């Protein structure tokens, strides 16, 4: 399970075996799926990371949580020409060494080479011994591949109408689970598109008994992935069958099938624990034996947020679950709070875990608030792998809905801000969007005093720059709850030799460009980084406090017909590389002192690497098919249509003309950057930036008094 918004951790231990630089005209590496896609913790395992472009001279591999070490095993340069969309990519050999205490679950994987950084792929870490699917035909129960139990089968649904069967021995009364990982280990892979509206595998799982009859069949249990829990009816040989619901297959459709009689937890109640406390939690899962409670514990030093924890059960250790570690009390819904009259009282701050046990059921919580006070409610469920599609609403004592929230920003889980219109007692109603219920319909709500706030978004999931050059990210600020102040953007964990031009987005602006600069002597290296916004706000107690909000990260996925699809991810990567297509970007002048109604001309010059003939798109924004996706200019400042948009292979200079509207707000020394982009595929570009251009717009002149 991928942890939601877990603190980033960098793991970049890689031994180099390839010393010859493979030629390439392209930067950003677009990874495919990994094969095998599952490895056992406590083991060193070979894997193939597949890529649309070469991974020669890979020097670092990063995961979104610490612990895993990686070795690059290719001994000779290996070409990896980009082929059609159906291509699985070229495999590059790596070894991963996974510690015995590594948390189980799905990890994000990113690679850095001397020439580029990569997109995201995924790797599953399991407790179970791994069995690889054989090349021999296993499409019927009679031809099923024999596997031990427990095991994690690493397979591929590689062709149209492909069916994979695996047989194992079971005993009467034995409780087993079968879980297929398919969509969850490909959800952020850039190269999954293989046909018209065909992307990830839509897995179906079936179990057949010794007599050949179907015992169980499932689809779409964990999101789009199936799961079966079953008590076996007889001694004998059982067959697990894996297929795609559409009977579509290709080499990208890797999967992991866990077959086990070990304990499997889906959730615990409560889902949170306060720092320095321990609590008995009720487990919800399978193969738990007579386990009635499990222990949740956090020390004073346990980091806050969602942390992976395994539980001790009567049948051994469970899989890892995300558990909310907080500084405040964690509560559990009584289960009787299913009407406004029986609402459960909560106080701020707190966390509360609820289980909507029946369809058409809702949970109610009452809370007190004074006029003008802000409070926030953040629901977590779907990001935890639970099916509860939560909605929240705040009602007044008469049942009038004052505010309602469904999906949050770039998430399926709801987040709600509420400002009390008067002193009084209010109700929070929590329910499933489709009025579903059951033992798995579990949620966690963090309820806190709130106030002025903001959110950060933008385009910043990868960056590449060679020594002596710059690149730019685009960042947006969404101010909330009456907040009007400036927000300072910070990037932590930058590679050696890389610095960031200070950027504060003033109260009159909502966006900007993060200008990253590599020193001329910067070594080739890379790191995972964290982009955040920082602001000083008035706290609920009236005192000033610093508020830090990490930017939500999304990646772009390749789709059919030039469409735009994005996927939330956890990681951002920056790498210093060998020279790319462009080795210098210059923009003049470096300062613009303007007033409303003015025009300004910026000259942009590019210097290409020898042999580079690519068309270069120039401007001030990130555009795709004549549509601006991300911009950096403050309100009232636009790019004139007469500006240069592209530089052909024979051109190296262009003009960017800025129009300053008469209504443009004053701004002082706001850093901009002239942007040059070389297209790779679709909206994926290598982005280059000039050194900062400082924009000042003077206040409008006052009209002379009559």
Image (cartoon, rainbow, N blue to C red):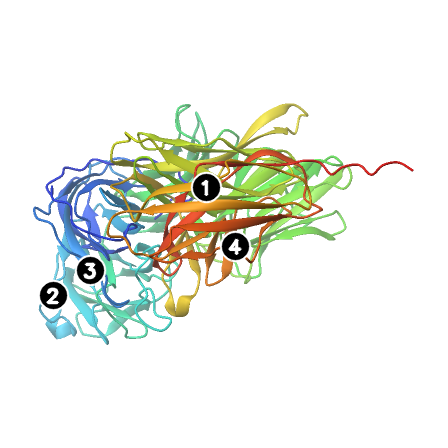
What residue is pinned by disc 4?
Answer: 643
Mark 1 Cα shell of 10 Å, populated few (<14), some (14-19), many (≥20):
many
Q: Position of residue 674 (x, y in %)?
A: 47, 44
> Answer yes or no: do the residues labelled 3 and 2 have beta carbons within 8 Å?
no
What residue is pinned by disc 3?
Answer: 81
Point out the frontmost of discs 2 and 1.
Answer: 1
Label 3 vs 4, first from the N-terminus: 3
What residue is pinned by disc 1?
Answer: 587
> Answer yes or no: do the residues labelled 4 and 1 have beta carbons within 8 Å?
no
Query: How far is mark 2 from mark 4, CA to CA?
Result: 63 Å
What residue is pinned by disc 2?
Answer: 145
Label 3 vs 1, first from the N-terminus: 3
Label 4 vs 1, first from the N-terminus: 1
Left or right: 406 with respect to 87?
right
Q: Quadrant of residue 487?
A: top right
Point out the frontmost of discs 2 and 4.
Answer: 4
Mark 4 Cα shell of 10 Å, populated few (<14), some (14-19), many (≥20):
some
Query: How far is mark 4 from mark 1, CA to CA?
Result: 14 Å
- SS assignment at label 3: loop
> Answer yes or no: do the residues labelled 3 and 1 have beta carbons within 8 Å?
no
């Amino acid at each position: 399970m991928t942890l939601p918004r877990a603190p980033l951790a960098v793991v970049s231990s890689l031994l180099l075996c390839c010393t010859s630089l493979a030629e390439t005209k392209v930067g950003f590496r677009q990874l495919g799926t990994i094969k095998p896609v599952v490895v056992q913790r406590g083991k060193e395992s070979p894997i193939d990371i597949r890529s649309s472009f070469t991974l020669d001279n890979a020097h670092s591999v990063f995961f979104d949580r610490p612990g895993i070490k990686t070795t690059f095993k290719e001994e000779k340069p290996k070409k990896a020409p980009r082929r059609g969309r159906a291509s699985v990519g070229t495999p590059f050999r790596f070894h991963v060494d996974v510690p015995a205490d590594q948390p189980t679950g799905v990890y994000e994987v990113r690679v850095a080479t001397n020439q580029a950084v990569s997109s995201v792929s995924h790797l599953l870490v399991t407790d179970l011994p791994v069995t690889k699917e054989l090349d021999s035909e296993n499409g019927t129960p009679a031809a099923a591949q024999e596997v031990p139990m427990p095991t994690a089968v690493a397979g591929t649904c590689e062709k149209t109408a492909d069916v994979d069967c695996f047989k194992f021995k079971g005993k009467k009364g034995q409780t087993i689970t079968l879980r297929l990982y398919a969509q969850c280990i490909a959800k952020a892979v850039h190269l999954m598109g293989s046909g018209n509206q065909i992307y990830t595998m839509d897995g179906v799982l079936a179990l057949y008994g010794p007599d050949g009859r179907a015992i169980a069949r499932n689809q779409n249990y964990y999101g789009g992935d199936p799961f079966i829990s079953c008590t076996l009816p007889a001694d004998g040989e059982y067959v697990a069958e894996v297929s795609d619901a559409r009977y579509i297959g290709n080499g990208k459709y890797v999967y992991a099938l866990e077959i086990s009689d070990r304990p499997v937890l889906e959730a615990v109640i409560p889902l949170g624990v306060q720092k320095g406390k321990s609590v008995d939690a009720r487990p919800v899962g399978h193969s738990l034996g007579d386990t009635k409670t499990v222990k949740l514990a956090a020390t004073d030093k346990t980091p806050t947020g969602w942390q992976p924890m395994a539980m001790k059960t009567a049948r051994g250790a469970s899989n890892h679950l995300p558990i909310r570690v907080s500084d405040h009390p964690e509560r559990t819904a009584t289960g009787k709070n299913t009407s406004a009259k029986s609402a459960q009282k909560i106080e701020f701050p707190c966390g509360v875990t609820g289980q909507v046990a029946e369809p058409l059921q809702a949970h109610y919580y009452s809370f007190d608030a004074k006029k003008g006070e802000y409070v926030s409610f953040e629901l977590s469920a779907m990001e935890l792998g639970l099916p509860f599609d939560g909605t929240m609403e705040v009602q007044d004592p008469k049942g009038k809905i004052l505010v309602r929230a469904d999906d949050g920003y770039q998430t399926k889980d709801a987040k709600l801000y509420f400002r009390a219109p008067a002193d009084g007692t209010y109700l929070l109603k929590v329910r499933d969007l489709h009025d579903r219920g059951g033992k798995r319909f579990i949620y966690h709500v963090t309820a806190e005093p709130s106030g002025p706030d903001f959110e950060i978004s933008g385009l910043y999931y990868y960056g590449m720059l060679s020594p002596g050059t710059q690149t730019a990210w685009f960042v947006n600020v969404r101010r909330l709850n009456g907040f009007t102040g400036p927000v300072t953007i910070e990037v932590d964990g930058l590679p050696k030799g890389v610095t960031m031009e200070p950027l504060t987005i003033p109260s009159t602006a909502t966006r900007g460009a993060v200008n990253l600069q590599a020193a001329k002597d910067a070594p080739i290296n890379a790191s995972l980084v964290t982009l955040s916004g920082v602001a000083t706000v008035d706290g609920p107690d009236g005192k000033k406090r610093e508020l830090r909000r990490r930017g939500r990260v999304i990646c772009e996925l390749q789709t059919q017909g030039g469409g735009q699809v994005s996927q939330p991810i956890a990681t951002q990567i920056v790498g210093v590389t060998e020279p790319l297509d462009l080795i210098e970007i210059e923009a003049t002048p470096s300062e613009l002192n303007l007033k409303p109604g003015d025009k300004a001309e910026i000259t942009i010059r590019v210097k290409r690497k020898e042999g580079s003939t690519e068309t270069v798109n120039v401007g001030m924004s990130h555009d795709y098919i004549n549509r601006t996706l991300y911009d950096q200019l403050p309100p009232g400042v636009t790019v004139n249509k007469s500006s240069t948009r592209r530089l052909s292979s024979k051109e190296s200079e262009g003009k960017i003309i800025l129009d300053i509207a008469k209504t443009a707000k004053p701004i002082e020394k706001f850093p901009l950057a002239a942007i040059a982009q070389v297209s790779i595929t679709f909206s994926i570009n290598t982005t280059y930036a000039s050194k900062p251009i400082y924009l000042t717009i003077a206040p409008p002149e006052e009209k002379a008094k009559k």
